[in-house]
Amino acid sequence: MKVQILVDNPNSWIVDYAKELEQKIQQLNLGQAKLIFEHSEVEEGDVLCLLSCENIFKKLSLNQYNLVVHESDLPQGKGWSPLTWQILEGKNKIPITLFEAEESVDSGVIYAQDSIDLEGHELLPEIKKKQGEKTIELILNFLKNYPNVKGEKQVGESSYYPRRTKKDSELNINKSIAEQFNLLRVCDNERYPAFFVKEGVRYELKITKA
């Protein structure tokens, strides 16, 4: 079985987990695995894993299966950064779905579902670790069952999350830390740190565990 893993941003947080997935596929003799970073490098094969891709991959006919992992109970929570949005909603049990990529975004058949379980204190690196580990688990289980895999159509009404921007990391100086702790948890200290503006001056806050 030929398995390709596409991450189209070589600086993405998921690269380390993609490398781990590549190694485990080889170690478990589940197929020939190859990690790639350009859409143009995708070849004909059996399974393509699209991990945290920032651009839509269009040549879906090259592979029999095109797998995507999305942190929501599809068709609820389509769109951008579903894990972050649900943490901001106060959720600690986040659904995670393995499904087939289609031309219509986040609409393909579902192969498996699980959940990412949080306790409410985890900061972004810990959250991403749980997300990466569960992503690897879902894909390995799919490959272990290949070719005896079957997808189920999504059922229910769709909902969508918008794309987050750096502006979404802004704190309200009139609210307490407790009220905004979930926002602090999901801010990236380097790429999009929490910040607030007071009297026209912008201040950035970085959070770590003592």
Image: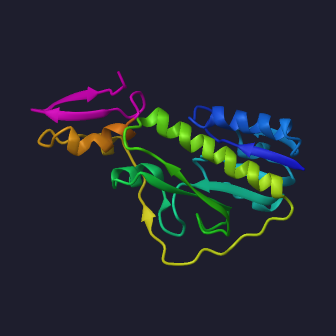
Is residue 18 located in the magenta-colored stretch of the structure?
no
Residue occupying the point 53% across, 55% down: 71
Q: Quadrant of residue 206?
A: top left
Number of disc labels: 0
Residue 116 in the image: x percent, y percent?
Answer: 52, 50
**Residue 160 falls left or right of residue 13:** left
Is residue 14 among the parts visible in the rendering?
A: yes
Is 49 placed above or below 15 here? below
Residue occupying the point 87% across, 52% down: 45
Is 91 placed above or below 40 here? below
Residue 18 in the image: x percent, y percent?
Answer: 69, 38
| Magenta span | 188-210
Is 150 placed above or below 59 here? below
Residue 171 in the image: x percent, y percent?
Answer: 23, 40
Residue 113 in the image: x percent, y percent?
Answer: 61, 61
Single out the residue that lies furthest toward the top. Answer: 210
Is 179 placed above or below 150 here? above
Single out the residue that lies furthest toward the front. Answer: 119
In front of the other: 204 or 19: 19
Location of the C terminus (image quadrant): top left
Residue occupying the point 82% across, 58% down: 145
In front of the other: 40 or 128: 128
Residue occupying the point 63% across, 47% down: 135
Is residue 80 among the parts visible in the rendering?
A: no
